Image: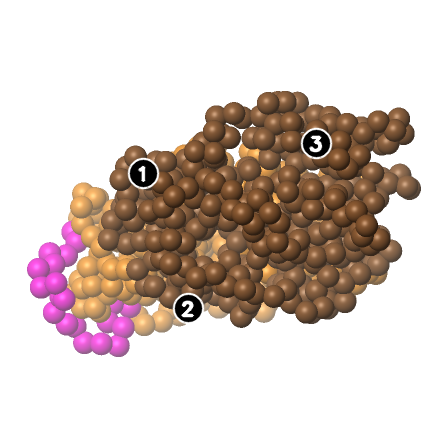
Chain colours: A brown, B orange
Amino acid sequence: MEFCGGHTHALCRFGLLDRLPVGIRLLHGPGCPVCVLPRARIDMAVRLLRDPNITLCTYGDLLRVPGSSGASLLTSKAAGGAVNLIYSPAEVLALAQAEPGRQFVFFAIGFETTTPATALLIREAQRRELHNLTVFCNHVLTLPAMHAILDSTGDPAAARLDGLIGPGHVSLITGLAGYDRLVQTCGVGVVVTGFEPLDLLQAILLLVRQVNAGRPRVENQYRRAVTTKGNAIARQLIEETFVLRPEFAWRGLGTLPESAWRIRDSLASFDAEQRFAMAPFTTPEPRGCACPDVLRGRSRPEDCPLYASVCTPERPIGACMVSPEGACAAHYLYRRHLGENHA
Amino acid sequence: MNSQDGSSERQSLDGGNKGIALDSVNDRPARHSGTERITLAHGSGGRATAELIAAVFRPRFTNPCLDRLEDGACLPRGAATDTVIATDSHVVSPLFFPGGDIGTLAVNGTVNDVAMAGGRCRYMSAAFIIEEGFAISALCRIVDSMADAARKAGVLIVAGDTKVVERGKGDGLFICTTGVGEVLTPNLPGCQFLQAGDRIILSGDIGRHGATITALRQGPALVTDLASDCAPLASLVEAMLATGAAIRCLRDPTRGGVAAVLNEWCDQAGVGIRLDETAVPVAANVAALCDLLGLDPWYLACEGRLLCACDATAVPDLLAAMRGHTEGRDACVIGEVIAAPAGLVQVTTAYGGRRLLDWRWSDPLPRIC
């Protein structure tokens, strides 16, 4: 399984799945930040936009994700809500400084890759004493999700994985230490890799060699970027700014303990959930949607009855159809022509 | 240019507008200090409008049809072939970019649309919707660009209109142009006549315009050497038509890029298309920007490229004609039309695998990580 949605996208985009030898099958993992974000969090953001004094800033991927009522940030924007597409959290600083009378909320999302940048934003807002900038924090952790997939002991439908292609950019921050326990407890090898086609092909080769030798372990194919220790400064910044939530509801994977960050109480004035008393929503998964099974590697996108019929990238129902990095969207966009017999 | 626009002359809305100096001695465009700005008076249809036309537009676009200053322009009868007309609205932001500005885009975009119908654009109208406060010096630069682009394309700008909207109700400047020309013989069959075995020719590398605008929108933090490919394609098309080769259809891949055009062709003709990714030129700086922002060059706009579908036997003649032309020197065959699966554009990747090149629902959005 490739955990990261960026890898799923690259495998489909470069047509690599067609070129793998018979006997090697790749399952797509849940490492797409947009895909695993519960619809309830979108609902909370959409409700925040009813306040005409609030501008919501976020990354492009998130704009099209529909909440439970079908309203997305993009449709809320069309209806008059103030939504700004940004590329870097630093842009929010400039916006907030330029308009001190207006509240700017950064809708923060992503795994360890984007978490340090959000931490920096909060630190910088504190230093500049910006009282009109807050963060709606939705940052999640990679390892709890990996364990949730691999620790499905006693579940007959669980995917039996022979190896895991580890995320490249996440590992840049986390380093490799966390994967050791995964290998020990689950007996599955992990190869951290980059996003170029040759990176992915080499990672697959390394995993095949591990399987053939019967010696699962952690390997780093992405040495030009990832070090064993990762980025200690970034991790320290995360620790100083955030604290683990006791649990967090993931879309598709259910509620996982200690799997997401919230802003520390000492920085509560920068926490949008507290500043605006954002009440939590409970939003069930859409009926008939196989995303939970797809995210765990139990089902292929085309096994879902909704896939490509009522669930398309234009009108996504399930989480995996929302972002181009979601497994269903990647299949729909790049592999629909191959019919049903190509997983 | 029509200065009255159906209303009688009114007093300037700002009351104190001094108008703009027209260099009446030699009737050349006047220079502007850079501090003069468009006011609502310039769109009032009154004297301020007339002065704006006299100072900015008329001297730059001057020609016998325009200079009559009637409500409409009478066009001399041309060759006895069908007439082709195309219209386009231009709303690009930022207005100025490496490789051109909204003015070059407004002329070349419409010249190219006429050319893709197998026509030669002769006359053009231009409507300007200007936001109050817009610098007249910037307007002059843009109108100069239009005059220059029109001259290069052999087009006369013969009719126009100017409206001014309140500050905050426009994005600086919008320009709508309509081009009229004659169809060069023979008429092109059209994309519904694509058939299996036809080849797809691309005139050059893709994505430069879209990449340039996308990079500029990132702000000063992102410095690139990208430049728009904005260019007129009329003479390239004439060279292609002159070969007499069996062209099915032509299209310039502007918004939506190459992907949008080829998907539309598949839908219209009920055929499929298979492309060879390695045959499609992408400049290194365009590819780098796409990598950085998570974009795909197939979907980025070109403003100086064309796609041509033709009979397989027409390829050698067309490539020779195109490669002898500045705008077509990198022309290449990028794929072919197949019978099935219909309605889908497939790409054989550099790694030998296959992927779909699908429509995009909306503008491409950058990925999170």
Report which quarter residue B217 is drawn in. Answer: top left
The magenta stretch spans residue B10: yes
User: Distance of mark 1 from mark 3, alpha carbons?
Assistant: 37 Å
Classify mark 1: helix, strand or loop.
Answer: helix
Residue B71 in the image, given as x and y percentages of width and height: 32, 72
Q: Chain of mark 1?
A: A
Closest to the observer: B294 or B337? B294
Counting residues from the start of the chain, the first of labels 2 and 1 encountered is: 2
The span shown in magenta is: B1-22
User: Which residue is at a point 70% across and 64% down the rendered structure image?
Assistant: A289
User: Label 2, on which residue?
Assistant: A79
Residue A186 place in picture, x, y as percent: 77, 37
Q: Label 3: state its secondary structure.
A: helix
Residue occupying image coordinates x 88% and y 29%: A214
Q: As displayed, is residue B244 above or below residue B332?
A: below
What amino acid is at disc 2? Ala
* Front-lying residue, B315 or A319: A319
What's the distance in space between the residues labelled 3 and 2, CA to CA? Answer: 48 Å
Residue with the mark numbered 3? A181
